[in-house]
Every structure is written in C-alpha cells, then in structure tokens.
Amino acid sequence: MEKKTVVKVNENNYETALIAKSLKQAVLDLKIISGKTMDLNIMEVEISEHKCAVVSIEGMASTASMAELVFRPLMEFDVKGYATEEDVFNFLTKQSLLSAERKILTTYGEVFLTLFSGFAVVFIDGCDKCVAFGIQGFDKRSIEEPTSDGNLNGSHEGFIETIRTNISLIRRRLKTPKLRFDMQQIGNDSKTDVCVAYITDKAPQGVIDKVKENLNKIDLDTIITTGYVEPFLQGKHKSLFSNVLATDRPDSFCAKLNEGRVGVLVDGVPLALICPSLFIENFQTIDDYVNKPFYTTYIRWIKYLAFFLAIALPGICVAIATNHPEILTHKFLINLSASEEVTPYSFFFEAIIITIMYELMREAGIRLPKAIGGAVSIVGALIIGDAAVSSSLVSAPLLIIIGLTATASFVIPNLNPQTSVFRMLFILAGGFGGLFGITLCFAFMLINISALENYGVPYNAPLSPFTFKAMRDVVTRPSFLKLGRTKTIVENLNGAKKI
Amino acid sequence: MRKISFGQMTVILFISRIFYSLTFVPFMYSDVTCQVIGFAISTAIECLAVIPAIILYKKHPDKNLCQIAYEKSKLCGILISVAFAFAAVLIINRLLRFFGYFMYVTFPDFLPSWVVISAIAVISFYAAFQGIEAISRSAGLTFAFFIVSFVIVIAALSTKMSYSNVMFDYPEISDISHEVFNELSKFSELLLFPILYPYVKEKAGKSIYGAIALKLIFVYVITTVCVLTLGSYLNISKFPFFDLGTYAETFIIERLDAFLLPAWILVAFIKAALFMFIGKIALSTSFKRTKANVYLLILSVAALAASLAAVLQEKWNFPVWDKVVVTILILVLGVLLPLVYCFGKGDESETE
C-alpha cells in the first residue's frame, strides 16, 4: 500500500492515510475527518494501563452488544503480564472472542467504512493498527411478504433493505458450498455493499466475470436503488425492455441461481437483480411451480393473452372502429355506431383521453398512502365509470375496453412500464394508420425485443431462436418429474453465446 | 462475427421468398395447370442455381462473395459490391412500390401510399441497423405468426372451398415458360445467400434448400386454396391471397384480412431489412473507410427515394427492363460469379 503521511489528514485524503500511533493524534484525526459529526461516539478508556478509545457511530452499533461484548471483557481484562501496547493488541485480536466478526484496520479509510457499517473500533495508544468488532445494531425492517410479486402458495418471505439478512434468506434455501457471495463496495461516497451471488458449477464463469467487470465500471457517488446499478448490467443495447430481472422474492432468486444466472444484491434495497433474464420470465411466477401443471399451463396462456390485450387491445379497437369497420359483424357495428353517435369526440380521441385518465389514476393510487389510494380508485371508478358515460363524454364500449386493458396489465406487473408506453403508441398508430399502423408498431416492438441480448443470451429465447426443450416450460408447465431431469441452464439455449 | 443457426437462415430465406408468393396468382395469362407445372420446373432450376453458391460456401465458409472477389482483385471486389448494393436497392424499390400499390388498391381512402412505403422503409432500416441476429429472431416470430394466421384463414375458408371451382386446361409451353421465368425473376434469395452464409453457424447449404422446399409446399397450398375458394374470380383478382382473407368469415369478425395484412407487412419489412443489410455488408466489404451504417442509410434513402418518385406519380406498373435487370443481376451475382470464384483455392476450415 502506498505510504502516506498521517500529518494534516483531512476529509479529502483520509482514505489511504495510515492511522496515527498516538491515540491523541488518532482521535484528533477522526474528529477532523468526520468534521466533528455528532453521531461519532468516542469513548476513551484505559486497559492494562494503556490508553484506548472505543469508537462507534450512534444508531449503527447495538449499545447492548457493545456493553456486553466489548466494554465488559475489556474492563475485566487483567493488566498484569501484558507489558506493551502490542500485547494489548494481540489480546484483542488473537486471545479473546469479543465478537464473531473482527477486522484489523490500518488506514482511516478502512476505519470509517467499518464504522459506517455498524462496527465498533478500538484504538490503542502507541499502536498504528486498530481492531474493529461487528456489533451492528441499526434498526431494520423485519422480513415481510413481498409487495410487488404476491403469491398464494409459495413462501411469504420477501427481501428487506439489509443485504446481510437477504444473503441469509438465500443461504437458507441453498445449503451448498457452491453458492458464493462476492461482496464489493460501490459508490464513491456511499460505499454501498453490492453482492454478486452465483452457484459455481451452474453459472458460466464468463458471465460471473462480466457482471463483476460491469459493476466495477460504476463510477457514481451514490448507489441508492437498484436502478443505479441496472443500466451498467444491461449492456449497450438501447431497448424499451429490460434484460435484467428484478425480484423481491428469495425463492425466485434461488430458482434463477439454480438455472445458472448471476444475482446482484444491493444494500438498502429490498430487491435483487438477476442477469441474464429472458422476456418469457416476466410471465412466470413462483405459484406456477406450486399449482398443478394443467392449471399453470392454462394460466400462462391467460397471461400471454393479458400482455397482448394490455398493449394492443385499445389500439386495435381504435384501428378497426376508425379505419376498418368492415371487419366487424353487422350487429356489433350497429351497436358501436349507436353508442358513438352521442359522444362529441371520435373514438380515437376518446381512447387517448381515457387512457391518460387511467394512467393518472394509477399513478395517483401508487404514490398516495394506501388509505387514500383506495379513495382514488373509488373516485376514478365514479368519474370514469359513471359520470363520463352518463354525460356522453365517452362511449360505454370504449370504457369496457380500457377497463379490460387495465385489468390485463395488472396480470404482468413486471412489464407495466412497457405496456403503458406501448398501449399509447398502439392507440396512436391505430388511429393514424389503422391495422397497418398497428402492425408497424408491432414490428418495432418485435425488433426492439429481438435485438436485445444480455451476457450472450438472446432476450426472446427460447421463442426465437427456438429451443424445443426450454419451450416446454413456456407453452406448458411440465411436472417436476420431467422438469427436474432437464437442466434449463440459459447458456444451453439456442443462440446463446459463451462469453 | 455474430452467427445465426441453420434454422434461422432457412426461415429468413423463406420469409424473403414468400413475399412475392403472397402477391401472385394472376391467372390472366396462365391457368392453374401451367402454374403448377411452372412452380415445379422453377423449383428444380432454383435447386440447380444455388449449387455454385453452396460450393463457394464450402470452400470459403467465413467469407462472403464480395470478400472473396476483393481478395482476388480489388477492382472486381468493388464492382461486385456495387452491383450487390444496386441489386439490393432495385429489389427494395420493387418491394416498396409493390406494397404501395397494394395499399392503394385495397385501401384507396386510407393512408397515402408515400406514407405507407416511408413507414415500411423506416422500420426496415431500424431492423437492418440492429443486425442479422435481430432480423433472424424477428423472422422466426414472424414465421410463427404467419403460419398461425394462414391456418386460421384456411380453417375459416374450409366451408367455402369447392372442387367445382377447379378448371384444368391443356398447358401451353409458352405459358409454362412465362411462368417459370416469372418465378425465377422473384428468386432474389440467390443474392442473399452468397452474402449471408458466413453468418450461419453450420449447414448453410441445407438452409437454402430448406427454404426452397418450404416455399414449394407453401405455393402449392396457397394455389390449391385460392383455386378451391375463389374459382374463376381469380381471373380478375389483383391480390388473390389477400382476397382469401376478405372472403374468410368467422362468427366473431366478418373478414379475416385483418390476420393476413399484419403477416404480409411483417414479411415485407423483414425482406426489405434483409436486402438493406446485405447492401450494407457488400459496400462495407470493399469500402472500409466509412462506417457500415452510413452505407445502410445511403441504400435505404436511395431505395425510398426511387420508390417515392414512382409512387408520387402513381406509376404502378413496373417497366419490363426492371424485371429483366433484376433477373440478370440475380443470375450474374447469384449464379455466375459464385461459379467463377468456386474454381479458386478454398479456405482450410470444414463446415458440414
């Protein structure tokens, strides 16, 4: 390590600066670096007639653990027989069991990183090293049911904000030494813990290395959410779809690791990222593997239909009603014509208005507290459902179409951003270009999905390039008697390249 | 180099081939017997015509025709690259104009034709820009969509088919030869293959035969369905295949052309994207200084401008020279040149 002078250490050069031998100087340095921040606790004590200081961050370390695991053993420690500060240091590091997690630190950078991770650090006068003890005790949310990916029959545990708890949730489900967690700090200021998880004999080494390489490329000051990390994992392709899957379920995460994927956990976020991911995985839930195969197969097709309805139904209806009414049956056409006669605007314009209103209501429902969010739904239903129709602002058939579309979009929550945008694009394309416009919009979406690949795996595999074996879990859901025998490692899909 | 599979190559060649098959069956000059015989003869000739390109592929599996020519002689390489780009522009121009005409005839009060062809050109450019893998993956899904919609339409027509519609006539040799020439002039995949085979992982030779076989099956099925369903109406129908969709009816919707139109548009944009892509590859092989995507843009703009010039003046009929020039280019670039270069020394690597 590059030797740097400890004199005049400050908040800009502290990271590699060596710890001062003198306790007085070390404490002074800590105060200078931290700018005398109020949450830095420095408690000076005397052990074996040697001056020491126990440093911690308020709220990050457990006071009970500190008293029980650090203060009491230190104070009960008999001084006789230990002459030098080196002996005290050796006692702390080699002959005592003050805490399960113990680190020897030599620079102020390491000191602050461990302090902010909830460690207590013991400085000894005359010693240019210090010892850190893991006694984290910050408040954290308990493990709760996942909010974004609900299920009926699977596990009800979801990831929380604390990365180490999340790691334990994964480890509990995969009790193999081949499961590895490689931790690194990312973010110039935040030094956020980011963990790469994989199973050694399943995940391709090239993908593991590439994920780590991509993470190392991140040059941001802070990592607040997974959204900061995701673009670096996604690759260069510009697409409306994301080829990195986010999940808040440890069971889904473990299933993907078992398929040879590489997972990324970010401290402070109750989500984990999985790469590479496939388009078709947006339609798969953990319940699919709990229910009977015949039912899952049926529900899967309902989900595929739901995706189609969510993006294209209003657009196709606008295209047909505006440009190709001859396609409709006579009775349907007469009914549609009768309902449209009383409305002031065209079907196309009505569709745009209702879709925008729906997006407004949805966004308001998400952002508002749950109690008020329900009220938004009621107001929305009243305004759209009753008032808009009775005042002849919009026609009832259109309302049914948008209602059906909205319901369909809830079936595939992972693709909600894409369905929202494409829905509007399809309406515009259908209104201006009829079925021709719809098809061009579909072609754009097709190319957009087809061009996407991540870590050598095409995003729309196993559909195209077609992989027969993998397609069994797409068009149907085989029983585990069959599914268990076939390893569905993504690297084995047709079109997947070794990187 | 990014590679595609044998199956993907088969599908993209098939998709490219069926674009014209979807627009055919004008029985004005030729009856069904001539067509059936004509398809069989033209398919046999197509199978023979691809042999030089396949030999070339076996000798130089990792180099396209332009690269091989450029390595032998720079001037020849440049000329061949330019010829390929020119052929690509001509074929895209034909495709766009044809599509503009189709929209003009079937939906006269709908979008102006120039908007239609411009939109297809833009989407095709986007696809070609994304590369051969993206095109081939899209072609796979288009193929599936096309088959599903075709099956739905045939199922909906099943009650309307009648053997009384079949009319056989004694075939005239001149009609058969005309049909054969007509079919061969549409075999533009002979231009795609010598440029695209380095992108295929293995069995590239079999892929073109697979595409020809699929096309033959498809044209026989479509001819049978057209004859059994439309009967003598075929003589006046401009787009019999599309008329099948118009004629098909279910209890949900009155006409099923809504299924065929998207399939047709997707097929058109895949074909246009493929030719834009090979034009780009051909030019970038010989003119390496400029970025390949600049050539793509130039080719797309040139093809679109040529189409717009014709469409805006409502010149729908293709001049005879157009068909002759395209046929000559197909024969020279797809058969003659591979034949010339396949006599040279090959590369060491084995393919099949």
Image (cartoon, coloured by chain):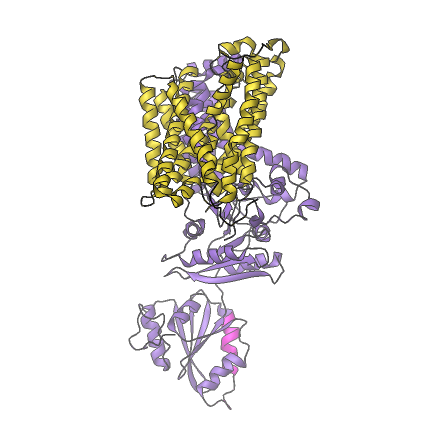
- A396 vs A114: above or below: above
What residue is shown at x 63% (from left), y 42% (from top)? A469
Residue A459 x, y percent position in the rendering? 50, 43
When asked about the image quadrant of residue A116, the answer is bottom left
Name the residue at the front extreme.
B343
Point out the stretch of residues depicted in magenta: A65-83
Q: Specify whether residue A373 is painted magenta.
A: no
Which shade is chain A? purple
Colour chosen for chain B:
yellow
Is the magenta region chiefly helix, strand or loop?
A: helix
Q: Position of residue B62 (x, y in %)?
A: 47, 46
Tell me how many marks there are.
0
> Toward the viewer: B306 or A324?
B306
Does B139 sit left or right of A30 as displayed?
right
Q: Evaluate whether residue A83 shows in this view.
A: yes
Residue B59 rendering spot, x and y as whole percentages: 50, 44
Residue furthest to the right in view is: A481
